[in-house]
Amino acid sequence: MLARLRLDPFLMILLAVLAVATLLPVRGGAAIAADHVTDVAIALLFCLHGAKLSREAILAGIGAWKLHLLVLSATYALFPLLGLAIVTTLGGTVDPLVAMGVLYLAILPSTVQSSIAFTAIAGGNVPAAICSASLSNILGILLTPLLAAWLIGGHAAGGDFFIQAVTSIATQLLLPFVLGHLARPWIGGWIDRHRQLVTRVDRGVILLVVYTAFSAAVVGGLWTRLSLADLATIAAICVVLLAAVLLLTRLAARLAGLPRPDAIVLLFCGSKKSLASGVPMAGALFPAAQVGVVILPLMLFHQLQLIVCSIIAARLARQNDPIEEPDHVRRTA
């Protein structure tokens, strides 16, 4: 039934975790202990991500440099500019933490698994998609906190946001990622054989971060702070943001003269934002009481992008020439 409705079962579990955090939030000393456990779990997660990264897969698609630049531009330039434009346009009509959440969503790296999966379904350049999505996530460990300091630092509490962000990312995310990748010659085979286990750890850490974050937010008065109108506004922002990026990446593919397989990569890798990276990074970047509100736009955008992109991928798979190629590309073919 969930597949027929195009709903992600994992999102249903996330909603259940939100309900538990609302009814039974962790408090006091238990909350402090949960925060420490969450920090360790996030470090483990990025260590596994580093060990999972295959240099061979990246080298197979790294030649499409123009495509990778376009994907990175969509992820780290187009998205932030659109997010900033939306927040500026709305001004003080949205909650400041919601505005931070929209900006945070806009500066996150692309997804890996779903971008590659949708590219494969639609008949795109899968090696290039693997390279683009992996490169986006690697650079995101550095670019996301830098962009956060620029776009969000003024909204965040305290004037040392940049120093805190870089320190947290370096020690909690980047160092474990590098150590995991350096250990790949010894543990890479085991990781490749147990990808389902890695996925379960991935999702388990997300659930843990969401529970602790929303517990802190609930204790701090989350549901008295946000109204149904605020949630509707967040949903509308996500719809506008995704629609704009999908249209602009499609236009960019035509203007750049990309062949159809590469245009599909730009469409899917350039329009996604990673829940798997975004939730743990939020736990490292923001105070616990803010994380619950900050990741709300990301959670809604995540489900929306899965629904919309699954429809687009199925349509691309059925049609022979859904993304029109430039005339010179068709003549060459």
Image (cartoon, grey):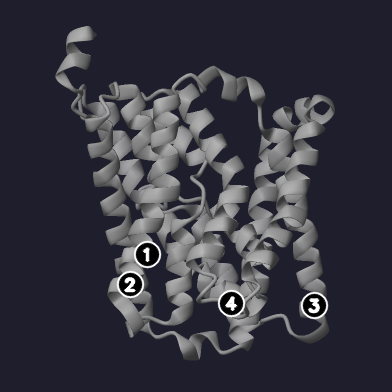
Per the rendering, the mark at residue 32 is: 3
Q: Answer with mark 1 or mark 4, whichever residue precedes in sequence.
A: 1
Q: Residues within 10 Å of mark 3 (few under 14, many from 20)?
A: few
Q: Are marks 1 and 2 in contact (CB under 8 Å)?
A: yes
- What is the CA distance from the residue labelled 3 to the residue labelled 4? 15 Å
Residue positioned 56% across, 54% down in the render: 144
Residue positioned 65% across, 75% down in the render: 287
Q: Is residue 226 above or below residue 238?
A: below
> Which label sits in the foreground, 3 or 2?
2
Residue 18 placed where, x, y %?
56, 72
Q: Residues within 10 Å of mark 4 (few under 14, many from 20)?
A: many
Q: Are marks 3 and 4 in contact (CB under 8 Å)?
A: no
Amino acid type of the residue tagged 1 in the rendering:
Leu
Q: Which residue is mark 1?
A: 84
User: Quadrant of the rendered structure where residue 69 is?
Assistant: top left
> Which label sits in the foreground, 3 or 1?
1
User: Quadrant of the rendered structure where residue 124 is?
Assistant: top left
Q: Which residue is mark 2?
A: 88
- What is the CA distance from the residue labelled 2 to the residue labelled 4? 21 Å
